[in-house]
Image (cartoon, rainbow, N blue to C red):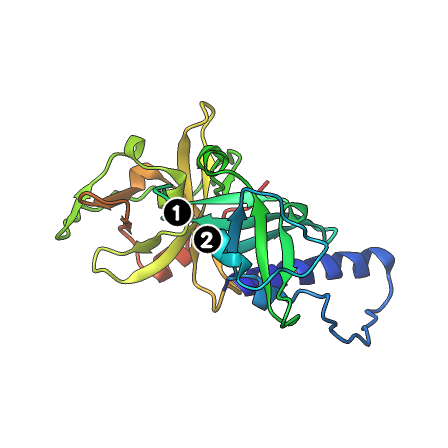
Amino acid sequence: MKTLMMTTAVCLNMATLVFADGHTTGFLDYTVTDDDLIASEFIGMRVYKAEGDVDFASNMVADAQTEWDDIGEINELVISRDGEVLAVIVGVGGFLGIAEKDVALEMSQIGILREADDVDDFFLVIKSSTEALEAAPSFARVMEKAEMAADRAMLAAPTVARDGYVTTERSDLTADMLTGARVYGVSDEDVGEIGSLLLDDDGTIGRAVIDVGGFLGFGEKQIAVTFDELTVLREDGGDDVQVYIDASQEGLEAQPAYVNP
């Protein structure tokens, strides 16, 4: 799904250019070279941290990766409508006690080192200290405040209890916990996923945008709901969350769509 999201962004950009220029689409007669990166392979690759000097202009020496720290993997690419890679999102988790989080890097910060004995094999390396990674801000899909549809009927938060989970107040939740969390109906049917969060005027998380329906990331409808309509259970002693709403998938699809301003 992550790869599909990136592909969609690229296709949207291509469509914008075509309509703006007013001509039909031209297709490339293109052959991939050893210097190219394929998105489906790039997303999911492991990322290593080196604190010493690294010569990115040369092939790496044999077993050089044993001196590096495996810090996580590439989860996503953020692409502008002009086709520029704005950020590479790396999931950092469990490294030397660093809490799990996504961090954003510029593409230029990621060095590509090819194996000396196998140029088809390469490693992604960043220069960073452990302290810098710990201090790096978390990346989360948090959008600006948007007004709710005036004609949308508010839902009542359901009363739900599940073994191993406790009801959690909004103040005890973070964007990392909520973004990407599955949303369930009261009978545990999967009705969607929290795709992004909306901020109130005071900067706190006020609403959740639920991605409902679709197939493999396509055709989803976004519905914005308040946290007063949700019941969030958090794993007792952990960070896993389960989000519940008193609605079926069909009921949510019938709600007015959220449009990002």
* Residue 239 can be seen in this image: yes
| Residue 3 lies in quadrant | bottom right
- At x 36%, y 37%, the residue is 174
Question: In x, y percent, where is residue 76?
Answer: 54, 55
162 or 115: nearer the viewer:
115
**At label 2, which amino acid type do we have?**
Gly
130 or 205: nearer the viewer:
130
Q: Secondary structure at mark 1?
A: loop
231 or 54: nearer the viewer:
54
- At x 55%, y 61%, the residue is 43
Q: Is residue 10 above or below residue 226?
A: below
Q: Quadrant of the C terminus?
A: top right
**At label 1, which amino acid type do we have?**
Phe
- At x 47%, y 25%, the residue is 201
Q: How many marks?
A: 2
Residue matched to label 1: 95
Residue neighbourhood size for the residue with mark 2, other residues' Cα within 10 Å, grouped as few (<14), some (14–19), many (≥20): many
Residue neighbourhood size for the residue with mark 1, other residues' Cα within 10 Å, grouped as few (<14), some (14–19), many (≥20): some
Q: Is residue 227 above or below residue 59?
A: above
Residue matched to label 2: 72
* Residue 8 can be seen in this image: no
228 or 243: nearer the viewer:
243
Extreme residue in the top direction: 202
Question: In x, y percent, where is residue 73?
Answer: 48, 56
Residue 62 shown left or right of residue 31 in the figure? left
Residue 256 shown left or right of residue 246 in the figure? right
Q: How many angstroms separate mark 1 from mark 2 (CA)?
A: 8 Å
The reply to whether dot 1 and dot 2 touch (C-beta < 8 Å) is yes
Q: Is residue 107 above or below residue 203?
A: below
Question: In x, y percent, where is residue 105?
Answer: 59, 44
